[in-house]
Image (cartoon, helix red, strand yellow):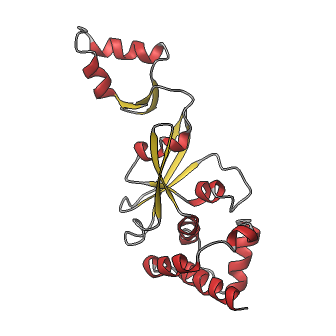
């Protein structure tokens, strides 16, 4: 269970020195620090379940989500998250893993996010289409379909079978929100593939 240091200290009201009792709980392995002011009671909690509590508002996206959906073959250890309006990247190295946060456009941010629940935790994650759009948004502009194919299937190693399952209408709708050449190119490329 995620808990703040303030809530823990409030539970120690009967102790004359709440801070000492609090640090004893940490020392004795009853509380596990995530980041300053935020603790977890179970040291075996998966990092992705904590991502939204560390820095937010945010949702899981980019490489971590692409791996989660089987779009890329690699297992991704860093929990990669999207934010908006923060204007700078953030990284947290914790006992629960490494977490990175970076902005996506404000208009695109709230779209295509799923709320999932697992073991009494809830977390937000981009749909496969949104995760791919978020990733392409972070890359240098691609010039043509050939560049895009090379980026998708060679550099990112996107699984073609999984790629072909993506919803074109979702990608088209998202492409209007990013104002990104890469995502507009992706939407056109997907439409062209269907018409071949």
- On the rendered structure, is 65 left or right of 72? left
What count of labels does the image hold? 0
Most foreground residue, 61 or 138: 61
Among the 4 quarters of the image, the one containing residue 72: bottom right
Q: In the rendering, at what x and y percent does residue 22 appear?
A: 35, 17
Residue 106 vertical placement versus 190 (above, below): above
Residue at (42% x, 54% y) in the render: 58
Find the residue positioned furthest to the bottom.
Answer: 195
Find the residue positioned furthest to the top.
Answer: 16
Q: In the rendering, at what x and y percent does residue 4 appear?
A: 34, 31
Placement of the N terminus among the 4 image quadrants: top left
Residue at (47% x, 14% y) in the render: 27
Q: In the rendering, at what x and y percent does residue 145 appear?
A: 69, 85
Placement of the C terminus among the 4 image quadrants: bottom right
Residue 137 vertical placement versus 35 (above, below): below
Most foreground residue, 43 or 161: 161
Residue at (37% x, 58% y) in the render: 86
- On the rendered structure, is 112 left or right of 23? right
Residue at (39% x, 33% y) in the render: 36
Residue 99 vertical placement versus 89 (above, below): above
Among the 4 quarters of the image, the one containing residue 83: bottom left
């Amino acid at each position: 269970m995620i808990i703040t240091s303030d809530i823990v200290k409030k539970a120690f009201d009967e102790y004359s020195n709440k801070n000492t009792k609090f640090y004893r709980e940490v020392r004795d392995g009853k509380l596990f620090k995530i980041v300053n002011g935020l603790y977890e009671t179970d040291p075996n909690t998966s990092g992705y379940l904590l991502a939204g509590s560390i820095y937010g508002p945010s949702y899981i996206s980019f490489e971590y989500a692409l791996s989660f959906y089987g779009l890329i073959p690699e297992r991704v250890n860093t929990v990669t998250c999207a934010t908006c309006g923060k204007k700078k990247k953030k990284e947290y190295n914790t006992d629960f893993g490494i977490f990175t946060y970076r902005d996506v456009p404000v208009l695109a941010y709230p779209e295509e996010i799923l709320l999932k629940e697992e073991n009494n935790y809830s977390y937000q994650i981009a749909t496969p289409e949104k995760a791919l759009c978020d990733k392409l948004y972070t890359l240098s502009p691609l010039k043509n379909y050939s560049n895009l194919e090379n980026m998708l299937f060679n550099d990112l190693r996107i699984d073609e079978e999984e790629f072909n399952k993506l919803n074109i209408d979702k990608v088209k709708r998202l492409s209007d929100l990013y104002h990104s050449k890469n995502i507009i190119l992706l939407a056109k490329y997907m439409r062209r593939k269907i018409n071949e």
